[in-house]
Amino acid sequence: MVDRDHISLILQEFHDCPYIGHMSEERTKERVASTAWWPKWEQELSEYINTCERCQKANRKHGKKYGLPQHIEKPKHPWETINMDWVTGLVPGGKENFNYCLIIVDRFGKSVRCLSCHKEDTDMDTALLFWNNRISTCGVPKIIISNRDPKYTPEFWTNLYYMLGTKIAFFTA
């Protein structure tokens, strides 16, 4: 059973954490249920998610209507802000039969890096590819702009944060 003082932290870590990111009530319940318990936890979790400001803004029923693209501030330094996307469905080529390509664009100088990879690569493989080819040479970007491609899973971000030495701590009784 969780100490009452830790409930707020648990709700934040399981729902608001940047690399897990505001999952649905059902998915958040699954994650909490496997780790923690306290009386009326499902009710408290539901109230927490239903009053989450970020979720309310993102919810199509309550949030802003789709409109014009939002302005992205111009970066002041190279590799400070990057775009990431995938090119998929490639004919396998090269010694290693690459069939995917991770495209990374520097928004400051418009430099482009095309990183060959495989559709079957794991989240850790992708995080290592990004680490070895961008972060280790250019540093950690302040802003990463990407679509919601399934390749950018919570596990990808978890592995990347692990390599950066950042960790998340979950508290249970």
Image (cartoon, grey):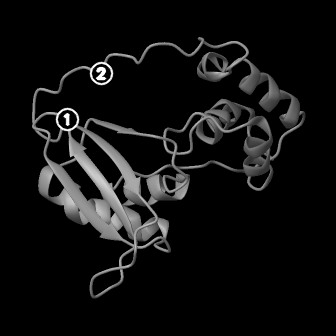
* Residue 57 percent location from the top left of the image: 61, 16
Whether residue 111 is situated above or below residue 115 in the rendered picture: above
- Would you name the residue on which mark 1 appears? 107
Q: Residue at x 80, y 41 (%)?
A: 26
Disc 2 crowd rating (10 Å Cα; few below 14, some 14-19, many 20+) is few
* Residue 4 percent location from the top left of the image: 74, 33
What's the distance in space between the residues labelled 2 and 1, CA to CA? Answer: 10 Å
Quarter of the image where one finds residue 54: top right
Earlier sequence position, callout 2 versus callout 1? 2
166 relative position to 140: left or right: right
Q: Which of 67 and 156 is in front in this view?
A: 67
- Element marked by disc 2: loop
Q: Which of 43 and 60 is in front in this view?
A: 60
Looking at the rendered structure, the number of numbered marks drawn on it comes to: 2
Q: Residue at x 24, y 41 (%)?
A: 141
Q: Which residue is drawn at 26% across and 35% down?
A: 142
- Would you name the residue on which mark 2 appears? 72
Quarter of the image where one finds residue 74: top left
Residue occupying the far front of the picture: 91
What label does residue 70 carry, if any?
none
- Element marked by disc 1: loop
Q: Do the residues labelled 2 and 1 touch (CB within 8 Å)?
A: yes
95 relative position to 119: left or right: left
Q: Residue at x 46, y 65 (%)?
A: 89
The kind of residue on which mark 1 rests is: Arg
The kind of residue on which mark 2 rests is: Ile
